[in-house]
Amino acid sequence: MIPQTFTFLLLDGFAMISVASAIEPLRSLNRLVDHAAYGWRLVSLRGGVVTASNAIPFMTEAVSNKLGSDDILIVCGGLRIQLFEERQLLGALRRAARNGARLGSLSTATHVLARAGLLDGYRCTIHWENQPAFEEEFPNLDCTGKIYEIDRDRLTCSGGTAALDMMLHLIGEAHGEELAQRVANQFHHERIRGEREDQRGGRLEHVSGLPPAMRAAIGLMQAHLEDPIAIADLARRVRLSPRQLERLFLRYEGATPARYYLGMRIDRARELLLYSDKPIIDVAVAVGFASTSHFAHWFKRLQGVRPSQMRGRGGAPMLA
């Protein structure tokens, strides 16, 4: 039996936990069935050493333009690549798609597939911290915020240990749920998460446990980051008085609705500064500020650094 081969295309600064979480289930399955059901290889655009985000180097082969129709090529997100390299990379991915390869991404690499035009008409996902910038750049794509998405011949994953769940799902499809669970047990992974599960992270992680009126208010805030709603209007729309809404927020969040709302807007600005190329003035407008000076004041107050300093920390929209 010819093993199914996964090709992992590493970008500089890729997140090692995502790649390890994707490869280790394949190795474990091979051990449990006592034959090579799966194979894998590490590639990069030109071959040679690629360094992970934790500074550990990995040797790679040069990516082939002749991937077979049975190959699954998964791009592993990393730091921003140079423009000339990006053109070569997008070309290689398009050729792989034309040759019939299934294409996937881990963590921030969903950006790469989108830029290559290979996610048009597909569901996809990306790490929750990168999702706002991704949606700004690709407003017409269906980015769901799930831990992973498998839509026909596209596999996108939010990264981290979600890659383990995605691979266990593929193993279950090919070899049965019992074997998939045995593989999961090897890693003390008690429950295999399905692709319908939402990511957890950031300010909105615990919203489901809040009172209904608060959930409704936060949903309205989230939908109106660019055009903020007055707190009095927000309270009216969730059928509370401003004072009742304030008491709820103080009890459950330790902040007034206005300060919580401001924090959401600054959180979004942080993500756009780190993971998009938008000018700072455009970031300010995207989170409801009419002037960069007002925006910079509140950003510095809540984040501890100026917007320009935050942008210098990220370096790229594809930071792993």
Image: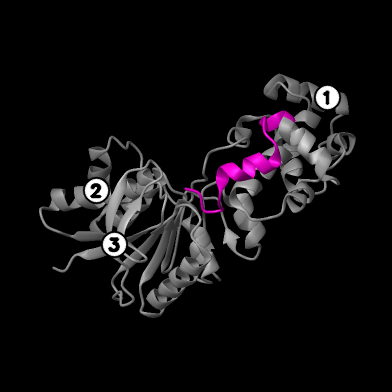
From the image, state whether disc 3 or disc 1 is nearer to you.
3
Label located before the other in sequence (2 or 3):
3
Q: Secondary structure at mark 1?
A: helix
When asked about the image quadrant of residue 235, the answer is top right
List x then y, in percent, for residue 146.
51, 50
Q: Is residue 221 above or below residue 246?
A: below
As drawn, the label of residue 244 is 1
Q: Secondary structure at mark 3?
A: strand
Rate crowding at label 3 as few (under 14), some (14 to 19) or many (20 or more) other CA atoms within 10 Å. Answer: many
The answer to whether residue 129 of the structure is visible from this angle is: no
From the image, state whether disc 2 or disc 3 is nearer to you.
3
- What residue would you read off at disc 3? 6
User: In the rendered structure, are the residues bearing label 3 and label 1 in contact, judged by CB atoms less than 8 Å apart?
Assistant: no
Of 53 and 25, nearer the camera is 53
- Relative side of 236 to 308, left or right: right
Q: Which residues are magenta?
A: 301-320
Q: How many circles with numbers are drawn on the protein?
A: 3
List x then y, in percent, for residue 213.
75, 33
The residue drawn where x is 68% and y is 55% is 278
